[in-house]
Image (cartoon, rainbow, N blue to C red):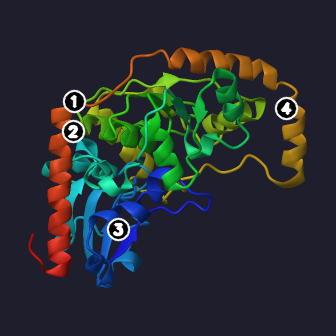
């Protein structure tokens, strides 16, 4: 069985969880079935991941994936695909399978104890931006100044898991920073730095656990980051969380405006400029960084004093039970064995 997921060339924690979670949860025999594919963690219920090339003559299983970052598969609806569960009620409604709403399959970490980091808790406050918000930012420096622990979503999975598991609080722009914190029962606070962050996937997940999504806005930490945000808004046309709506209809309609007849968007925003001109521009802009770092430092400190989130134990346990039952059904279907 091939596990389909987005593979960032630089690494991305949420997506890279696929490489360790399923092997810790499912029997090795599952991965010997070369006629099966699994769509797991990620906002990848979309055309380029479930294309004819990826799914032709394959048994297709979907467990815990979400929509929201690209057009739906052209081969959907498809009665031959086994949609065992999806990330949340927005994805479930979008694909016409309301009963399939569970929660993000990264919550299955709760059913894979050998992946849970061992050792004592620390008193750390972790800050984890989205992987696209790290380059040319000053967030690592600001965390050192504030005594916080900076976590880069591009780090290896084990290192990031360890930092989240030992924290007393996680501030995160990376959705799977929040999902894993919630799974490990560490309080978390959602923040957003970039206008490229899409509300659909966050609200899909938080609704799955009956939570409200109320992110705290953080200003850019450097002049280059500020320029990048201007470019994202004016050239790419992204508004991120600044036009956040609680209406399911608004979110579904926005999805179809973005992706109804459009070509698939790349998950990563395009660069402003590259090569030597970019280096010269960055050096020039860096002389203005102090204006941005001071403001960003104050905002990050204030965010750390906000009201943390944590899903209710009973709701979380019920969702994990459903995911686990679906995972065991997947294993039974592929291997022909009973539990």
- The residue positioned 89% from the left and 38% from the top of the image is 283
Residue with the mark numbered 4: 285
Residue with the mark numbered 3: 23
- The residue positioned 26% from the left and 68% from the top of the image is 26
The foreground one among 3 and 21 is: 21
**x then y, percent, for residue 95:** 24, 54
Residue 88 in the image: above or below residue 63: above
**x then y, percent, for residue 205:** 31, 40
> Is the C-beta separation of discs 3 and 2 under 8 Å?
no
**x then y, percent, for residue 270:** 66, 51
- The residue positioned 8% from the left and 74% from the top of the image is 338
Q: Which comes sooner in the sequence, label 3 or label 2?
A: 3
Quadrant of res 296: top right
Which of discs 3 and 2 lies nearer the camera? The answer is: 3
> Is the C-beta separation of discs 2 and 1 under 8 Å?
yes
Q: In this view, does 176 lie to the left or right of 33?
A: right
> Judging from the image, what secondary structure is the residue with disc 1 in?
loop
Q: Which comes sooner in the sequence, label 4 or label 1?
A: 4
C-alpha gap between disc 4 and disc 3: 46 Å
Q: Which comes sooner in the sequence, label 4 or label 2?
A: 4
Q: What numbered label is drawn on residue 316?
A: 2
Residue with the mark numbered 1: 312
> Judging from the image, what secondary structure is the residue with disc 4 in?
helix
C-alpha gap between disc 1 and disc 3: 28 Å
Which of discs 4 and 3 lies nearer the camera? The answer is: 3
Q: How crowded is mark 1: few (under 14 residues within 10 Å), some or many (20 or more)?
A: few
Residue 116 in the image: above or below residue 334: above
Q: Which comes sooner in the sequence, label 1 or label 3?
A: 3
């Amino acid at each position: 069985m091939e596990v389909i997921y987005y593979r960032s060339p630089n690494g991305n924690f949420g997506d890279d969880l696929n490489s360790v979670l399923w092997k810790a949860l499912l029997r090795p025999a599952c991965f010997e079935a070369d006629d099966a594919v699994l769509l797991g963690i990620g906002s990848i219920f979309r055309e380029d991941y479930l294309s004819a090339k990826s799914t032709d003559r394959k048994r297709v299983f979907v467990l815990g994936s979400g929509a929201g970052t690209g057009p739906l598969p052209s081969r959907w609806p498809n009665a031959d695909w086994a949609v065992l569960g999806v990330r949340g009620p927005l994805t479930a409604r979008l694909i016409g399978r309301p009963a399939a709403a569970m929660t993000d399959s990264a919550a299955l970490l709760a059913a894979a104890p050998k992946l849970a980091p061992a050792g004592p808790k620390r008193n750390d406050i972790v800050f984890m931006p989205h992987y696209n918000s790290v380059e040319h930012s000053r967030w690592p420096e600001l965390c050192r100044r504030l005594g916080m622990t900076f976590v880069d979503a591009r780090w290896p999975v084990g290192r990031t898991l360890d930092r989240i598991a030992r924290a007393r609080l996680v501030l995160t722009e990376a959705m799977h920073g929040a999902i894993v914190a919630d799974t490990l029962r560490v309080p978390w606070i959602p923040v957003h730095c970039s206008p490229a962050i899409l509300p659909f996937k966050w609200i899909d997940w938080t609704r799955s656990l009956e939570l409200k999504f109320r992110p705290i806005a953080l200003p850019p930490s450097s002049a280059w980051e500020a320029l990048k945000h201007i470019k994202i808004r004016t050239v790419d046309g992204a508004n991120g969380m600044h036009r956040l709506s609680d209406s399911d209809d608004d979110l579904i309609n926005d999805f179809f405006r973005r992706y109804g007849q459009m070509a698939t968007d790349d998950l990563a925003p395009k660069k402003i400029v590259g090569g030597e001109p970019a280096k010269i521009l960055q050096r020039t802009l860096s002389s203005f960084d102090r204006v941005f770092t001071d403001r960003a430092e104050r905002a990050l400190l204030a965010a750390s004093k906000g009201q943390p989130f944590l899903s209710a134990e009973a709701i979380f346990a019920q969702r994990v039970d459903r995911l686990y039952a679906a995972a065991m059904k997947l294993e039974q279907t592929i291997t022909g064995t009973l539990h």
